[in-house]
Amino acid sequence: MEKEIERVEDITLLVNTFYDKIRKDELLSPVFNAIIKDWEPHLEKMIQFWSTLLLYTRTYKGDPLPSHLPLKVDKAHFDRWLLLFNQTVDELFTGEIASNAKKRAFSIARIMKAVKQIPEEKL
């Protein structure tokens, strides 16, 4: 189905497909499902977040970092999150904005790992 990311509806498809995978993943689902009791508001917030980053809609307000700091996650969680995100983008989309989405996701994971003092490689 690969197509360009052009509209908020494309971001909605990306976010919903990605979080469907997260909610089924044996490593990530316990982390997300323990915190998120009502998925609809979370998904809407993620659609606004990614729409703002990729389509410059300016619909997301806030800072995602503080809400993620308390999570008990390690390098394996971030690696799996990034793997599932990239797989989802590649399954659904192509083009410059799709490539940008993967770059942004990599940067987000890198920043969160740094803030949480998670080393890039196991020692």
Image (tube, helix red, strand yellow):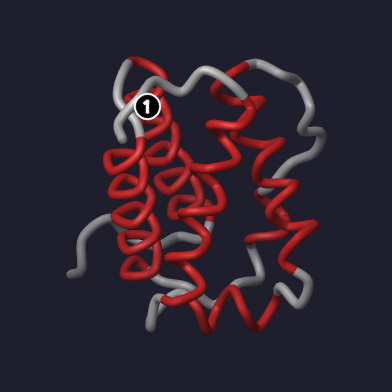
Q: Residue furthest front?
A: 1
Q: Which residue is mark 1?
A: 98
Instruction: Give the quarter of the image for residue 11.
Output: top right
In the image, residue 111 sits, relative to residue 100, either above or below, namely below
Identify the residue at image location x=31%, y=70%: 76
Side of 57 relative to 113 (left or right): right
Identify the residue at image location x=52%, y=60%: 19
Name the kind of residue labelled 1 in the image. Ala
Looking at the picture, how far across and down is residue 107, in whole percent?
Answer: 42, 36
In the image, residue 66 sits, relative to residue 97, either above or below, namely below
In the image, residue 18 sits, relative to residue 4, either above or below, namely below
Side of 62 relative to 6 (left or right): right
Q: Which quadrant would the C terminus be assigned to in this image?
A: bottom left
Q: Which quadrant would the N terminus be assigned to in this image?
A: top left
Element assignment for label 1: helix
Side of 47 relative to 13 (left or right): right
Instruction: Give the quarter of the image for residue 21.
Output: bottom left
Identify the residue at image location x=66%, y=46%: 46
